[in-house]
Image (cartoon, rainbow, N blue to C red):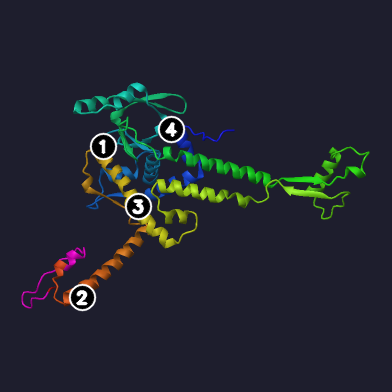
Amino acid sequence: MNGTTNYSTLTDQEKVRYMLTNPALAKTINYNCDVFSTLKIVRKDENEDDLTRLLKNPNPFQTQRQFLWMYRFWIMFGSAYLKSESNNIASSNAKLFWLEPQKFTWDDKLLDKLDKLMISKKSKNDLMRETIEYTYRDGSKSLIPLGDISAFHDLANGMGNWLKGNSRIDPLYKIISNSESGLDSKNINLEFSRKYLVAGQYDISKNLNSPVGMQNVEKEGIVSKLRSKQAVHPIKAQVDIKRFVDNLANLKLDESFNEDLNKIGSMYNIPSDVLEAIKGTSTYENMEKSTARHIEYSEMPKGMDLLEGLCTQFELNPEDYELIFANNSFMKVFEKDQSEIFKSNAKTMESLVKIGGDANEIAEMLGMNLKFKKNAESNQQI
């Protein structure tokens, strides 16, 4: 045995497998995806247009919520790739599909081109005419032009590949691997906790003519007695019974899992209060406030990336749209806090105006979007 760690680089296929099967990582991913899927992209003028209609039914197999869920899932993988069947949003063929990144084949020839600086418009257009191989489950392959794909990234792209971003799963690999080992350890210990070691007290000085050790018939007899429903068992000699695993709690395997969850969740910017709530150790109000802040700092930027990408794809103006989570309970907490702040500012303003302050200057100082005008006769602010 040696004391060195044994970690290897994860392939894209392995990353997807861990995202779906490792409990700590999957819990983190599912939380972010569930929150993001409540997003609504609406027009600021409150009218419906081709984009908002398309998002309600992006393709024949997904609802808007499922479409947004998968976007967030692939962003947490590292990069999300959107393929549209048409760049004309008014066309009936304008369907949106998320591609599975692990099905791409990044060959060396393509990677060499994606590593180059694209200075001119012509060089970019030439690159977008290149194709990438996409392999389906049955082994059949499709060549997809890069120009048909819109790429979205979690972290920075352009580190050797303009179309592939870095993944947070790479620095998390050791934690994920340790979490897997911890779960395996608990599974094995639970199995052994059901098993017992039975030993008979044998005095060879009193049994000189007897064979040393317990015979098979004696072993079978003890096992039979231990597994029977009989309450009293007469025995010839004292028997010592011990568990293989005496105290599973001393191993602190659940505590280790929670620590892994904390580390993975923090890597994906989930606040500690939310992580504590996920584990059932935080209050509802703290969780709601932390969720609202998480949306503002983490989910809104990802939503803006998606909106801008869609607008670029279909030549629309992103300024015509807005992202809202307003129908969700956690946003009500922010609204309540803002209401309390407004009340406090209003009282402050009232006090300052009474001693001669200018209402408009005070409103600006307090960050209140209010305008006042003066009564020409009384010179009083109204």
Q: Earlier in the sequence, mark 2 or mark 4?
A: 4
Q: Amino acid at mark 1?
A: Gln
Residue 108, position as x, y percentages in the image: 36, 22
* Local crowd size for mark 1, using a 10 Å CA cut-off: few (<14), some (14–19), many (≥20): some
Q: CA distance from mark 2 to mark 3?
A: 36 Å
Q: Choose mark 4 or mark 1, whichever is in front.
A: 4
Does the magenta-highlighted stretch encompass residue 229?
no
Q: Residue 65: where, in percent of width, then height? A: 38, 46
Q: Which residues are magenta?
A: 362-380
Q: Of all residues shown, which one is farthest toward the right?
A: 209
Q: Earlier in the sequence, mark 3 or mark 1?
A: 3
Mark 4 secondary-structure assignment: helix
Amino acid type at image mark 4: Asp
User: For mark 2, what is the residue?
Assistant: 351
Residue at 59 percent across and 33 percent down: it is: 1
- 133, 44: nearer the viewer: 133
The disc, 2 or 1, on the residue closer to the chain's N-terminal end is 1
Which of label 2 and label 1 is nearer to you?
A: 2
Q: CA distance from mark 2 to mark 1?
A: 53 Å
Mark 3 crowd level (few <14, some 14–19, many ≥20, 10 Å Cα): many
**Are the two marked residues, 3 and 1, in contact with CB atoms closer than 8 angstroms?**
no
> Which residue bears the numbered disc 1?
313
365 magenta-colored: yes
Look at the numbered disc 3 and give the secondary structure of its residue: helix
Q: Is 293 displayed left or right of 314 in the figure?
A: right
Tell me the distance, in whole angstroms, between the alpha carbons under discs 3 and 1.
25 Å
Q: Give the number of the disc on residue 12.
A: 4
Q: CA distance from mark 4 to mark 3?
A: 27 Å
User: Label 3 belongs to which residue?
Assistant: 295
